[in-house]
Amino acid sequence: LAASASILGNGGDIALDQATNNLTGEVSINTTGAATVSITDESELRFGVVGVGTGDLTARAGSFTQNGSGIVTGGAASFNANGTSTGAIILNEATNSFGGNVSLFNTNPAEGVQLRNSIALVLGTVNTAGSLSVWGAGITQGGTGINATGSASFDAGAGQINLSNVDNEFAGSVSLNNTGPNNVAITDATALA
């Protein structure tokens, strides 16, 4: 599908998870309530406006980008970039609003992961072979840990940073930034650089 696509769930689940999907245009998604969304693209998945109620969003593609519009989810969100494309995850729009845990996976050490949230961010499971850059109005964890092979940076604005999962493993350098009287806590299963 080369043209832009707008997918409306009308409160029902959206399941577009065939491994051979090839959505080369911008994809906008809207559903409400507890409906879930599952979408797969064999190459780059470029998001337009995405709105998911309290259900989960599960996305698999070669890479992920956005067009300048936000992703708004109430449930958990998972982005897995492991296809034949670049492997980058670039979801850094200022209007993103992830209300649940966000999990991130990429397998290409030459490509990075960028995630921005306009509200407090709860990271789920994160496994990245490249660099990791995260912004949120506070950053905490709710998954099984962060495994980052490249450098990692976390900017929590005027919020706390609590990355104290004992299974975290940061192989590269780690940068932490916040402002105001907010605590910072980080745990690494090995040596922290």
Image (cartoon, rainbow, N blue to C red):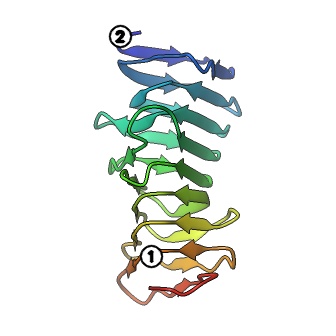
Residue, x 45% and y 76% (percent of image)?
159
Q: From the viewer's side, name the closer residue of 154 and 170.
A: 170
- Is residue 32 visible to the viewer in this orientation of the structure? no
Relative horizontal placement of residue 120, taking residue 118 as reference (left or right): right
Q: Are marks 1 and 2 in contact (CB under 8 Å)?
A: no
Quadrant location of the N terminus? top left
Relative horizontal placement of residue 159, taking residue 73 as reference (left or right): left
- The relative height of residue 185 versus residue 43 in the rendered view (above or below) is below
Label 1 or label 2, whichever comes before in sequence order? 2
Q: Position of residue 50 (x, y in %)?
A: 46, 32
Q: Position of residue 29 (x, y in %)?
A: 49, 25
Residue, x 41% and y 47% (percent of image)?
96
Other residues around mark 1 within 10 Å, as few (<14) / some (14–19) / many (≥20): many
Give the secondary structure at mark 1: loop
Give the secondary structure at mark 2: loop
The Cα–Cα distance between marks 1 and 2, rounded to whole angstroms, is 41 Å
Q: From the viewer's side, name the closer residue of 70 and 15.
A: 15
Q: What residue is shown with label 2?
A: 2
Q: Position of residue 12 (x, y in %)?
A: 68, 20
Label number found at residue 159: 1
Amino acid type assigned to the residue bearing label 2 in the image: Ala
